[in-house]
Image: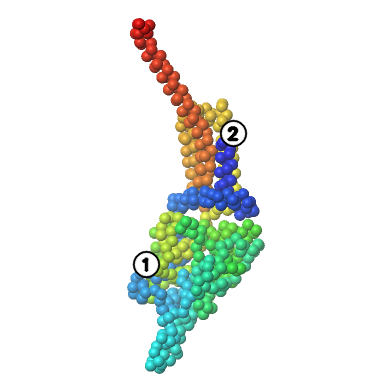
Amino acid sequence: MALAVLLGLSLINLSSEWPSDLPRPAVVGALDDALPDSFKAARQLLFDQYQRRFPRVPTAQPVTIVEIDEETLATVGQWPWPRNRLATLIDAIAAQKPLAIGLDIYMPEPDQTSPDKVAANLPASAASLAAGLRALPSHEAILAGSLRAAPTILGAAALDHDVFGAMTDLRSAPIVVHGSDPLDQVQRFDYVLASLPELQAAAHGEAMLSVSLEQGVVRHFPLIMGLRDKLVPSLPMEMLRLATGSAALDVYADPSGVQAVGVADVDVPTQHSGDIWLHFASIRSTLNRYVSARDILQGKVDPERIRGKLILVGLTGSGVTDMRTTPLGELVPGIEIQAQVIETIVEGRFLRRPAWLKWAESAFIMTFGLAIIWYVPRPRSQIAVFMRTVPKASTVLGLLLHLVNAVCCFFIFKRFGLLVDAASIFIILSAVMGCFFSRTLLQVVERSRTGAALAQQREDNNERAREPAGKARGP
Protein backbone atom coordinates (compact mmCIF):
# COMPACT_ATOMS: atom_id res chain seq x y z
CA MET A 1 0.00 0.00 0.00
CA ALA A 2 2.78 2.44 0.89
CA LEU A 3 4.57 1.73 -2.40
CA ALA A 4 1.37 2.35 -4.39
CA VAL A 5 0.78 5.62 -2.53
CA LEU A 6 4.36 6.75 -3.14
CA LEU A 7 4.32 6.02 -6.88
CA GLY A 8 0.81 7.37 -7.46
CA LEU A 9 1.24 10.66 -5.62
CA SER A 10 4.68 11.21 -7.15
CA LEU A 11 3.22 10.88 -10.65
CA ILE A 12 0.37 13.27 -9.81
CA ASN A 13 2.88 15.72 -8.38
CA LEU A 14 4.97 15.58 -11.56
CA SER A 15 1.90 16.05 -13.75
CA SER A 16 1.00 19.24 -11.87
CA GLU A 17 4.36 20.79 -12.78
CA TRP A 18 5.84 18.78 -15.62
CA PRO A 19 9.42 19.91 -16.35
CA SER A 20 9.73 21.83 -19.59
CA ASP A 21 12.83 19.95 -20.71
CA LEU A 22 10.86 16.78 -21.52
CA PRO A 23 7.93 16.03 -23.86
CA ARG A 24 4.65 15.79 -21.96
CA PRO A 25 3.28 12.20 -22.13
CA ALA A 26 -0.42 11.68 -22.72
CA VAL A 27 -0.90 10.02 -19.31
CA VAL A 28 0.58 13.07 -17.59
CA GLY A 29 -1.78 15.38 -19.46
CA ALA A 30 -4.73 13.15 -18.59
CA LEU A 31 -3.78 13.17 -14.90
CA ASP A 32 -3.42 16.93 -14.86
CA ASP A 33 -6.84 17.32 -16.50
CA ALA A 34 -8.46 14.86 -14.10
CA LEU A 35 -6.83 16.37 -10.99
CA PRO A 36 -6.21 20.05 -11.77
CA ASP A 37 -4.22 22.03 -9.23
CA SER A 38 -3.74 18.89 -7.13
CA PHE A 39 -0.41 20.06 -5.71
CA LYS A 40 -0.25 23.54 -7.25
CA ALA A 41 -2.38 25.30 -4.63
CA ALA A 42 -0.29 23.94 -1.73
CA ARG A 43 2.91 24.82 -3.60
CA GLN A 44 1.77 28.41 -4.17
CA LEU A 45 0.73 28.89 -0.55
CA LEU A 46 4.12 27.61 0.59
CA PHE A 47 6.01 29.94 -1.75
CA ASP A 48 3.90 32.82 -0.44
CA GLN A 49 4.93 31.88 3.10
CA TYR A 50 8.58 31.98 2.06
CA GLN A 51 8.13 35.59 0.99
CA ARG A 52 6.05 36.60 3.99
CA ARG A 53 8.73 35.21 6.27
CA PHE A 54 11.60 36.73 4.28
CA PRO A 55 10.35 39.68 2.16
CA ARG A 56 12.89 41.44 0.00
CA VAL A 57 14.46 44.46 1.67
CA PRO A 58 15.29 47.06 -1.02
CA THR A 59 18.93 48.07 -1.20
CA ALA A 60 18.53 50.58 -4.05
CA GLN A 61 15.84 52.90 -5.34
CA PRO A 62 16.23 53.15 -9.11
CA VAL A 63 12.53 53.92 -9.66
CA THR A 64 10.38 56.91 -8.79
CA ILE A 65 6.64 56.63 -9.29
CA VAL A 66 4.85 59.82 -10.29
CA GLU A 67 1.35 59.03 -9.15
CA ILE A 68 -1.78 60.69 -10.41
CA ASP A 69 -3.37 60.38 -6.99
CA GLU A 70 -6.54 61.71 -5.43
CA GLU A 71 -4.89 64.97 -4.45
CA THR A 72 -3.77 65.51 -8.04
CA LEU A 73 -7.22 64.73 -9.42
CA ALA A 74 -8.81 67.11 -6.92
CA THR A 75 -6.40 69.91 -7.89
CA VAL A 76 -5.86 69.40 -11.62
CA GLY A 77 -9.12 67.78 -12.65
CA GLN A 78 -10.78 64.41 -13.09
CA TRP A 79 -9.38 61.63 -15.26
CA PRO A 80 -9.01 61.29 -18.22
CA TRP A 81 -7.15 64.53 -18.62
CA PRO A 82 -6.92 66.54 -21.82
CA ARG A 83 -3.77 65.35 -23.61
CA ASN A 84 -2.14 68.78 -23.40
CA ARG A 85 -2.36 68.59 -19.60
CA LEU A 86 -0.60 65.21 -19.64
CA ALA A 87 2.01 66.79 -21.94
CA THR A 88 2.64 69.46 -19.30
CA LEU A 89 3.31 66.75 -16.70
CA ILE A 90 5.75 64.94 -19.02
CA ASP A 91 7.56 68.20 -19.77
CA ALA A 92 7.91 68.91 -16.03
CA ILE A 93 9.37 65.45 -15.42
CA ALA A 94 11.70 65.61 -18.44
CA ALA A 95 13.11 68.94 -17.24
CA GLN A 96 14.71 67.07 -14.30
CA LYS A 97 16.68 64.72 -16.63
CA PRO A 98 15.38 61.20 -15.85
CA LEU A 99 16.84 58.16 -17.60
CA ALA A 100 13.45 57.03 -18.95
CA ILE A 101 9.77 57.80 -18.46
CA GLY A 102 7.35 54.88 -18.66
CA LEU A 103 3.65 55.64 -18.94
CA ASP A 104 1.41 53.01 -17.37
CA ILE A 105 -1.29 54.57 -19.52
CA TYR A 106 -2.65 53.89 -22.98
CA MET A 107 -4.68 56.29 -25.12
CA PRO A 108 -6.49 54.47 -27.96
CA GLU A 109 -9.10 57.17 -28.65
CA PRO A 110 -8.79 60.82 -29.77
CA ASP A 111 -9.05 63.53 -27.15
CA GLN A 112 -12.56 64.95 -27.44
CA THR A 113 -11.43 68.20 -25.77
CA SER A 114 -8.94 68.89 -28.57
CA PRO A 115 -9.58 72.22 -30.40
CA ASP A 116 -10.55 70.56 -33.68
CA LYS A 117 -13.05 68.28 -31.90
CA VAL A 118 -14.58 71.23 -30.05
CA ALA A 119 -14.83 73.17 -33.33
CA ALA A 120 -16.75 70.31 -34.92
CA ASN A 121 -19.46 70.64 -32.26
CA LEU A 122 -19.97 74.37 -32.61
CA PRO A 123 -23.09 75.73 -34.37
CA ALA A 124 -22.85 77.30 -37.80
CA SER A 125 -23.24 80.76 -36.26
CA ALA A 126 -19.82 80.32 -34.59
CA ALA A 127 -17.96 79.69 -37.84
CA SER A 128 -15.23 82.23 -37.08
CA LEU A 129 -14.61 80.70 -33.66
CA ALA A 130 -14.51 77.22 -35.18
CA ALA A 131 -11.96 78.36 -37.77
CA GLY A 132 -9.78 79.82 -35.03
CA LEU A 133 -9.93 76.57 -33.05
CA ARG A 134 -9.02 74.48 -36.10
CA ALA A 135 -5.93 76.64 -36.57
CA LEU A 136 -4.63 75.54 -33.15
CA PRO A 137 -2.57 72.35 -32.76
CA SER A 138 -4.51 69.33 -31.59
CA HIS A 139 -3.92 67.97 -28.11
CA GLU A 140 -2.47 64.82 -29.70
CA ALA A 141 0.08 66.94 -31.54
CA ILE A 142 1.06 68.72 -28.33
CA LEU A 143 1.44 65.42 -26.46
CA ALA A 144 3.36 63.88 -29.37
CA GLY A 145 5.83 66.75 -29.17
CA SER A 146 6.39 66.10 -25.46
CA LEU A 147 6.78 62.36 -26.02
CA ARG A 148 9.31 62.98 -28.77
CA ALA A 149 11.38 65.41 -26.70
CA ALA A 150 11.66 63.13 -23.65
CA PRO A 151 12.86 59.49 -23.25
CA THR A 152 9.31 58.15 -23.09
CA ILE A 153 7.75 54.71 -23.39
CA LEU A 154 4.04 54.08 -23.84
CA GLY A 155 2.21 51.16 -22.28
CA ALA A 156 -0.29 48.95 -24.09
CA ALA A 157 -2.86 46.48 -22.75
CA ALA A 158 -2.71 42.87 -23.96
CA LEU A 159 -6.04 41.31 -24.98
CA ASP A 160 -7.21 37.79 -25.79
CA HIS A 161 -10.19 39.00 -27.82
CA ASP A 162 -11.02 41.78 -30.22
CA VAL A 163 -12.56 45.02 -28.94
CA PHE A 164 -13.19 48.37 -30.54
CA GLY A 165 -9.89 50.12 -31.17
CA ALA A 166 -7.77 46.98 -30.67
CA MET A 167 -4.75 46.38 -32.90
CA THR A 168 -2.84 43.30 -33.99
CA ASP A 169 0.62 44.87 -33.96
CA LEU A 170 2.72 47.05 -31.70
CA ARG A 171 5.48 49.47 -32.55
CA SER A 172 8.24 48.11 -30.33
CA ALA A 173 12.01 47.76 -30.32
CA PRO A 174 13.48 44.62 -31.92
CA ILE A 175 14.11 41.47 -29.90
CA VAL A 176 17.09 39.35 -30.96
CA VAL A 177 16.63 35.61 -30.30
CA HIS A 178 19.70 33.50 -29.60
CA GLY A 179 18.88 29.82 -30.07
CA SER A 180 15.43 28.29 -30.63
CA ASP A 181 12.35 30.37 -31.35
CA PRO A 182 10.49 30.65 -28.00
CA LEU A 183 7.25 32.07 -29.41
CA ASP A 184 5.26 28.91 -28.60
CA GLN A 185 6.50 28.91 -25.00
CA VAL A 186 5.72 32.49 -23.96
CA GLN A 187 2.37 33.98 -23.05
CA ARG A 188 0.72 35.00 -26.32
CA PHE A 189 -2.05 37.43 -27.22
CA ASP A 190 -3.90 38.17 -30.43
CA TYR A 191 -4.80 41.80 -29.82
CA VAL A 192 -3.50 44.84 -28.04
CA LEU A 193 -5.11 48.09 -26.96
CA ALA A 194 -2.45 50.69 -27.68
CA SER A 195 -2.24 54.46 -28.03
CA LEU A 196 -3.04 56.33 -31.22
CA PRO A 197 -0.55 55.84 -34.09
CA GLU A 198 0.49 59.50 -33.85
CA LEU A 199 1.49 59.00 -30.22
CA GLN A 200 3.17 55.64 -30.88
CA ALA A 201 5.32 57.20 -33.59
CA ALA A 202 6.44 59.99 -31.24
CA ALA A 203 7.40 57.84 -28.23
CA HIS A 204 10.82 56.19 -28.03
CA GLY A 205 9.38 52.78 -27.17
CA GLU A 206 6.23 50.83 -26.50
CA ALA A 207 5.64 47.84 -24.26
CA MET A 208 3.03 45.49 -22.81
CA LEU A 209 1.49 46.08 -19.39
CA SER A 210 0.23 42.56 -18.76
CA VAL A 211 0.93 40.70 -15.49
CA SER A 212 0.47 37.01 -14.66
CA LEU A 213 -2.25 36.19 -12.13
CA GLU A 214 -2.68 32.92 -10.23
CA GLN A 215 -5.89 32.78 -8.20
CA GLY A 216 -5.87 36.59 -8.11
CA VAL A 217 -2.28 36.90 -6.84
CA VAL A 218 0.72 38.23 -8.79
CA ARG A 219 3.58 35.78 -8.34
CA HIS A 220 5.18 35.83 -11.80
CA PHE A 221 5.90 38.62 -14.24
CA PRO A 222 6.48 38.13 -17.99
CA LEU A 223 9.59 39.90 -19.29
CA ILE A 224 8.59 39.16 -22.90
CA MET A 225 5.30 38.15 -24.50
CA GLY A 226 3.99 37.18 -27.88
CA LEU A 227 1.68 39.31 -29.99
CA ARG A 228 0.55 36.94 -32.72
CA ASP A 229 3.82 36.04 -34.49
CA LYS A 230 5.99 38.69 -32.85
CA LEU A 231 7.88 38.92 -29.56
CA VAL A 232 7.24 42.13 -27.61
CA PRO A 233 8.80 43.43 -24.37
CA SER A 234 7.27 44.22 -21.01
CA LEU A 235 7.42 47.78 -19.71
CA PRO A 236 10.31 47.19 -17.24
CA MET A 237 12.55 45.61 -19.89
CA GLU A 238 11.79 48.32 -22.43
CA MET A 239 12.58 51.02 -19.87
CA LEU A 240 15.91 49.39 -19.08
CA ARG A 241 16.66 49.13 -22.81
CA LEU A 242 16.00 52.83 -23.33
CA ALA A 243 17.89 53.83 -20.17
CA THR A 244 21.00 51.89 -21.24
CA GLY A 245 20.84 53.10 -24.84
CA SER A 246 20.53 49.55 -26.20
CA ALA A 247 19.14 49.05 -29.69
CA ALA A 248 17.44 45.72 -28.88
CA LEU A 249 16.67 43.16 -26.22
CA ASP A 250 18.29 39.71 -26.25
CA VAL A 251 16.41 36.47 -25.63
CA TYR A 252 18.31 33.24 -24.96
CA ALA A 253 16.27 30.12 -25.59
CA ASP A 254 16.56 26.39 -26.23
CA PRO A 255 13.94 23.80 -27.23
CA SER A 256 12.52 23.78 -23.68
CA GLY A 257 11.82 27.54 -23.76
CA VAL A 258 13.32 30.84 -22.64
CA GLN A 259 16.40 30.65 -20.44
CA ALA A 260 17.19 34.36 -20.01
CA VAL A 261 16.28 37.83 -21.25
CA GLY A 262 19.14 40.30 -21.60
CA VAL A 263 19.55 44.04 -21.89
CA ALA A 264 22.96 45.71 -22.20
CA ASP A 265 25.26 43.61 -19.97
CA VAL A 266 22.49 42.21 -17.72
CA ASP A 267 20.98 38.77 -18.32
CA VAL A 268 17.89 37.95 -16.29
CA PRO A 269 17.29 34.20 -15.71
CA THR A 270 13.69 33.26 -16.45
CA GLN A 271 11.28 30.37 -16.41
CA HIS A 272 10.77 28.62 -19.76
CA SER A 273 7.75 30.89 -20.42
CA GLY A 274 9.83 34.06 -20.17
CA ASP A 275 8.44 34.87 -16.69
CA ILE A 276 10.35 35.59 -13.52
CA TRP A 277 9.29 34.79 -9.98
CA LEU A 278 9.02 38.09 -8.16
CA HIS A 279 10.57 38.50 -4.72
CA PHE A 280 8.36 41.22 -3.31
CA ALA A 281 9.27 43.96 -0.90
CA SER A 282 6.58 45.19 1.45
CA ILE A 283 4.73 48.27 0.23
CA ARG A 284 5.64 49.88 3.56
CA SER A 285 9.31 49.83 2.55
CA THR A 286 8.66 51.38 -0.89
CA LEU A 287 6.29 54.24 -0.10
CA ASN A 288 9.13 56.76 -0.35
CA ARG A 289 9.38 56.13 -4.10
CA TYR A 290 5.96 57.78 -4.67
CA VAL A 291 5.73 61.42 -5.75
CA SER A 292 2.43 63.18 -6.36
CA ALA A 293 1.96 64.50 -9.91
CA ARG A 294 0.45 67.62 -8.33
CA ASP A 295 3.77 68.36 -6.61
CA ILE A 296 5.64 67.81 -9.89
CA LEU A 297 3.37 70.29 -11.67
CA GLN A 298 3.77 72.82 -8.86
CA GLY A 299 7.56 72.46 -8.77
CA LYS A 300 7.65 71.23 -5.17
CA VAL A 301 9.69 68.04 -5.70
CA ASP A 302 13.41 67.72 -5.02
CA PRO A 303 15.05 67.33 -8.48
CA GLU A 304 17.25 64.51 -7.08
CA ARG A 305 14.17 62.33 -6.86
CA ILE A 306 13.85 62.51 -10.64
CA ARG A 307 17.37 63.05 -12.00
CA GLY A 308 18.99 59.83 -13.23
CA LYS A 309 15.98 57.74 -12.21
CA LEU A 310 13.57 55.48 -14.07
CA ILE A 311 10.21 57.24 -13.81
CA LEU A 312 6.87 55.44 -13.91
CA VAL A 313 3.76 57.55 -14.44
CA GLY A 314 0.43 56.01 -13.53
CA LEU A 315 -2.87 56.29 -11.73
CA THR A 316 -3.26 55.53 -8.03
CA GLY A 317 -6.37 57.59 -7.28
CA SER A 318 -9.34 55.72 -5.84
CA GLY A 319 -11.58 54.29 -8.55
CA VAL A 320 -9.17 54.91 -11.44
CA THR A 321 -6.42 52.36 -10.73
CA ASP A 322 -6.07 48.60 -10.94
CA MET A 323 -5.14 47.07 -7.58
CA ARG A 324 -3.17 43.82 -7.36
CA THR A 325 -2.59 41.36 -4.53
CA THR A 326 0.97 40.25 -3.83
CA PRO A 327 2.17 37.06 -2.06
CA LEU A 328 2.70 39.23 1.02
CA GLY A 329 -1.08 39.64 1.20
CA GLU A 330 -0.85 43.35 0.35
CA LEU A 331 -3.10 45.17 -2.11
CA VAL A 332 -0.92 47.48 -4.22
CA PRO A 333 -1.41 49.63 -7.34
CA GLY A 334 -0.53 47.87 -10.59
CA ILE A 335 2.27 50.36 -11.22
CA GLU A 336 3.99 49.16 -8.03
CA ILE A 337 4.39 45.72 -9.64
CA GLN A 338 6.24 47.30 -12.57
CA ALA A 339 8.51 49.18 -10.17
CA GLN A 340 9.34 46.07 -8.17
CA VAL A 341 10.33 44.21 -11.35
CA ILE A 342 12.80 46.96 -12.29
CA GLU A 343 14.13 47.07 -8.73
CA THR A 344 14.61 43.29 -8.67
CA ILE A 345 16.55 43.33 -11.94
CA VAL A 346 18.75 46.27 -10.91
CA GLU A 347 19.57 44.59 -7.58
CA GLY A 348 20.09 41.22 -9.28
CA ARG A 349 18.07 39.40 -6.60
CA PHE A 350 16.04 36.81 -8.47
CA LEU A 351 13.90 33.98 -7.21
CA ARG A 352 14.49 30.82 -9.22
CA ARG A 353 12.76 27.51 -9.77
CA PRO A 354 14.83 25.85 -12.50
CA ALA A 355 13.65 22.67 -14.24
CA TRP A 356 16.29 20.53 -12.52
CA LEU A 357 14.86 21.43 -9.12
CA LYS A 358 11.66 19.49 -9.81
CA TRP A 359 13.71 16.40 -10.66
CA ALA A 360 15.79 16.86 -7.49
CA GLU A 361 12.61 17.07 -5.39
CA SER A 362 11.16 13.97 -7.07
CA ALA A 363 14.42 12.05 -6.55
CA PHE A 364 14.46 13.00 -2.87
CA ILE A 365 10.81 11.96 -2.41
CA MET A 366 11.37 8.59 -4.10
CA THR A 367 14.62 7.89 -2.27
CA PHE A 368 13.28 8.78 1.16
CA GLY A 369 9.94 7.09 0.52
CA LEU A 370 11.56 3.84 -0.61
CA ALA A 371 13.89 3.95 2.39
CA ILE A 372 10.86 4.21 4.68
CA ILE A 373 9.09 1.35 2.89
CA TRP A 374 12.18 -0.88 3.01
CA TYR A 375 13.35 -0.16 6.56
CA VAL A 376 10.29 0.44 8.71
CA PRO A 377 8.58 -2.99 8.24
CA ARG A 378 11.76 -4.92 9.16
CA PRO A 379 10.82 -6.54 12.49
CA ARG A 380 14.25 -6.05 14.10
CA SER A 381 14.85 -2.47 12.91
CA GLN A 382 15.04 0.14 15.62
CA ILE A 383 12.32 2.23 13.96
CA ALA A 384 10.00 -0.77 13.72
CA VAL A 385 10.54 -1.65 17.39
CA PHE A 386 10.01 1.99 18.35
CA MET A 387 6.78 2.21 16.33
CA ARG A 388 5.46 -1.04 17.80
CA THR A 389 6.32 -0.02 21.34
CA VAL A 390 5.12 3.59 21.29
CA PRO A 391 1.61 4.07 19.83
CA LYS A 392 2.24 7.68 18.70
CA ALA A 393 5.72 7.01 17.38
CA SER A 394 4.71 7.46 13.71
CA THR A 395 3.23 10.86 14.41
CA VAL A 396 6.24 12.05 16.41
CA LEU A 397 8.70 10.77 13.82
CA GLY A 398 6.73 12.24 10.92
CA LEU A 399 6.43 15.66 12.52
CA LEU A 400 10.13 15.71 13.33
CA LEU A 401 11.14 14.84 9.76
CA HIS A 402 8.79 17.42 8.25
CA LEU A 403 10.02 20.11 10.64
CA VAL A 404 13.57 19.45 9.42
CA ASN A 405 12.28 19.55 5.82
CA ALA A 406 10.57 22.91 6.33
CA VAL A 407 13.57 24.48 8.09
CA CYS A 408 15.95 23.34 5.34
CA CYS A 409 13.69 24.65 2.54
CA PHE A 410 13.26 28.03 4.23
CA PHE A 411 17.04 28.27 4.63
CA ILE A 412 17.58 27.44 0.94
CA PHE A 413 15.08 30.14 -0.01
CA LYS A 414 16.72 32.77 2.15
CA ARG A 415 20.30 31.88 1.23
CA PHE A 416 20.04 30.98 -2.47
CA GLY A 417 16.63 32.29 -3.63
CA LEU A 418 15.53 28.79 -4.71
CA LEU A 419 11.86 27.87 -4.42
CA VAL A 420 11.92 24.31 -3.08
CA ASP A 421 8.52 22.61 -2.98
CA ALA A 422 8.48 21.43 0.63
CA ALA A 423 4.66 21.13 0.46
CA SER A 424 4.74 18.23 -2.00
CA ILE A 425 7.50 16.53 0.00
CA PHE A 426 5.37 16.88 3.13
CA ILE A 427 2.15 15.60 1.53
CA ILE A 428 3.64 12.55 -0.20
CA LEU A 429 5.92 11.38 2.61
CA SER A 430 3.14 11.96 5.16
CA ALA A 431 0.90 9.68 3.12
CA VAL A 432 3.61 7.00 2.99
CA MET A 433 4.21 7.26 6.74
CA GLY A 434 0.45 7.19 7.26
CA CYS A 435 0.28 3.70 5.79
CA PHE A 436 2.51 2.42 8.61
CA PHE A 437 0.80 4.62 11.14
CA SER A 438 -2.56 3.08 10.19
CA ARG A 439 -1.12 -0.42 10.57
CA THR A 440 0.33 0.40 13.98
CA LEU A 441 -2.94 2.01 15.06
CA LEU A 442 -4.91 -1.10 14.06
CA GLN A 443 -2.52 -3.25 16.03
CA VAL A 444 -2.93 -1.04 19.09
CA VAL A 445 -6.73 -1.11 18.75
CA GLU A 446 -6.70 -4.90 18.36
CA ARG A 447 -4.50 -5.29 21.44
CA SER A 448 -6.84 -2.98 23.34
CA ARG A 449 -9.87 -5.02 22.34
CA THR A 450 -8.14 -8.31 23.25
CA GLY A 451 -7.07 -6.88 26.60
CA ALA A 452 -10.58 -5.65 27.28
CA ALA A 453 -12.06 -9.07 26.44
CA LEU A 454 -9.58 -10.85 28.74
CA ALA A 455 -10.30 -8.41 31.54
CA GLN A 456 -14.03 -8.99 31.15
CA GLN A 457 -13.50 -12.75 31.21
CA ARG A 458 -11.46 -12.51 34.42
CA GLU A 459 -14.15 -10.34 35.97
CA ASP A 460 -16.81 -12.89 35.09
CA ASN A 461 -14.74 -15.72 36.58
CA ASN A 462 -14.17 -13.76 39.76
CA GLU A 463 -17.88 -13.00 39.97
CA ARG A 464 -18.76 -16.69 39.72
CA ALA A 465 -16.14 -17.55 42.30
CA ARG A 466 -17.70 -15.16 44.80
CA GLU A 467 -21.19 -16.73 44.53
CA PRO A 468 -22.42 -18.78 47.67
CA ALA A 469 -21.74 -22.48 47.52
CA GLY A 470 -25.41 -23.43 48.12
CA LYS A 471 -26.57 -21.25 45.32
CA ALA A 472 -23.98 -22.81 43.12
CA ARG A 473 -25.30 -26.42 43.97
CA GLY A 474 -28.95 -25.50 43.48
CA PRO A 475 -32.03 -26.71 45.44
Residue sitting at the far front: 475
User: On the picture, is 464 further left or further right than 350?
Assistant: left
Q: Position of residue 73 (x, y in %)?
A: 36, 73
Residue 299 seen: no
Determine the residue positioned at 44% across, 19% down.
454
Q: Amino acid at mark 1?
A: Ser
Q: CA distance from mark 1 to mark 2?
A: 61 Å
Say which of 302 and 401 sits in front. Answer: 401
Q: For residue 442, which numbered disc appears in the image?
A: none
Question: Circle 1: is it few (<14), some (14-19), or many (20+) Cα within 10 Å?
Answer: few
Badge 1 marks a residue whose secondary structure is: loop
Which mark is first along the chain, 2 or 1? Answer: 1
User: On the picture, is 145 further left or further right than 251?
Assistant: left
Q: Amino acid at mark 2?
A: Trp
Say which of 154 and 447 sits in front. Answer: 447
Determine the residue positioned at 60% across, 48% down.
359
Compared to residue 435, the image places residue 130 above or below, namely below
User: On the picture, is 210 further left or further right than 228?
Assistant: left
Badge 2 marks a residue whose secondary structure is: helix
Q: Position of residue 425 (x, y in %)?
A: 53, 44
The residue to which callout 2 is attached is 374
Q: Quadrant of the N terminus?
A: top right
**Which quarter of the figure has residue 171?**
bottom right
The residue to which callout 1 is attached is 318
Q: Position of residue 322 (x, y in %)?
A: 43, 65
Say which of 86 and 107 sits in front. Answer: 107
Determine the residue positioned at 44% across, 89% down.
134
Question: Circle 2: is it few (<14), some (14-19), or many (20+) Cα within 10 Å?
Answer: few
Determine the residue positioned at 63% across, 65% down.
177
